[in-house]
Amino acid sequence: MLSEAGKVIGTELSKKYSFRSRKQIGSQIRIEEPVDQKEKSSRENELLILKKGSTKEKTSKRQHLSIAYEERMLNDSLQKEGLKGSVSGATRTESKKLKWEPDNWREVINNIREMRRQRDAPVDTMGCDKCADESAPPKETRYHSLVSLMLSSQTKDAVTYAAMQKLRQHGLTVPNVLNTDDKTLGQLIYPVSFWKSKVNYIKRTTQILQDEYDGDIPDSVEKLCKLPGVGPKMAHLCMKTAWGILTGIGVDTHVHRISNRLGWVKKATKTPEATRIALEAWLPTELWDEVNNLMVGFGQQLCKPVNPLCSTCLNRNLCPFGQLHSRGKQ
Ligand code: SF4
């Protein structure tokens, strides 16, 4: 039986909402088909105060409210992420499908692996991960990794690699670089792009390493990004190369360009950093390391900045840019 308070509240609820049918079970009122769906959640919350029925009925009603609560939470979350649509009880089990990912991406990446099977792009033999002296003391090897990444910005791998060879012959250690005048350092790294600025960055960064890190390099993306001339791309790659820690996708100009051509970003991105965030939103973590090397080499050999070789690309029928490019040529 309903308590007096329950009856009063039940009457008030009947006035407030138009129920198609109600059932009294124990001391609870079960709502069968609410007419006003918008007020469903608030009504169910109000009904909680009628919970004086059997344990079984309480459990049933609580479970239902829990689902409604979860739906609201999920919908709030989706709205915060800027995703349209809402999750209803019928569709909540499909929430995983709401996570965006590009069509056919597994096929696309397998095709790139196939096209990169030879591993004969410049990045494969002269990339930044090939520039450090692995036989040097660990601190020194890590410093080599950082310097090579600083030199590599907007510079071809072969040029960076040659500069690193000269620096290593000169003695690429923190104390030695600090003892080297700017002119000599410039001569050692020339013709690396923006070599004058890079001399300045390397000198200032090396001084910080000496003063604040006991001659070692920082061990986090955040600290690396505070060094002069070091950005997120370098920091993530440095964490992987120097420390063996995967912290994010290293997105350079190749990864940025190809991701946009393939439609691997939900909306076109303007910067490598925006591309990194967009890729990390859907690409499985276990591929974050591989995708940098795959795409860089692919960009060096096939998906070039100008005149990509779409006609020979295995992805030409899967790639929006390739399809457009081919149509334009017909
Ligand atoms: S079809 Fe062209 S643009 Fe697309 S991935 Fe291949 S080479 Fe790049």
Image (cartoon, grey):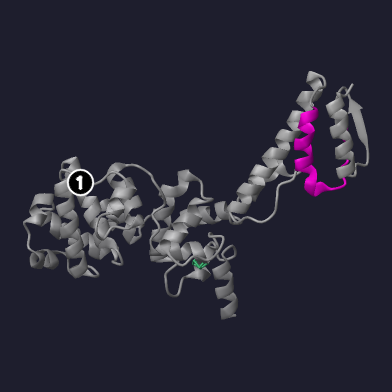
Residue 84 visible in the displayed image: yes
Query: Relative to residue 304, is residue 65 depicted above or below?
Result: above
Q: Residue at x 41, y 52 (%)?
A: 249
Which image quarter holds the N terminus? top right
- Up the image or down, 204 lies above or below 96; here it is below
Is 276 on the left or on the right of 192, as rendered? right
Q: Position of residue 300 (x, y in %)?
A: 38, 65
State left or right for residue 95 relative to residue 140: right
Closer-to-camera residue (37/175)? 37
- Secondary structure at badge 1 equals helix
The residue depicted at 19 percent of the width and 44 percent of the height is 213
Q: Residue furthest right?
A: 21
Is residue 118 among the parts visible in the rendering? no
Q: Magenta segment range?
A: 30-50
Determine which residue is flagged by label 1: 141
Query: Which part of the image, by quadrant, shows the C terminus?
Result: bottom right
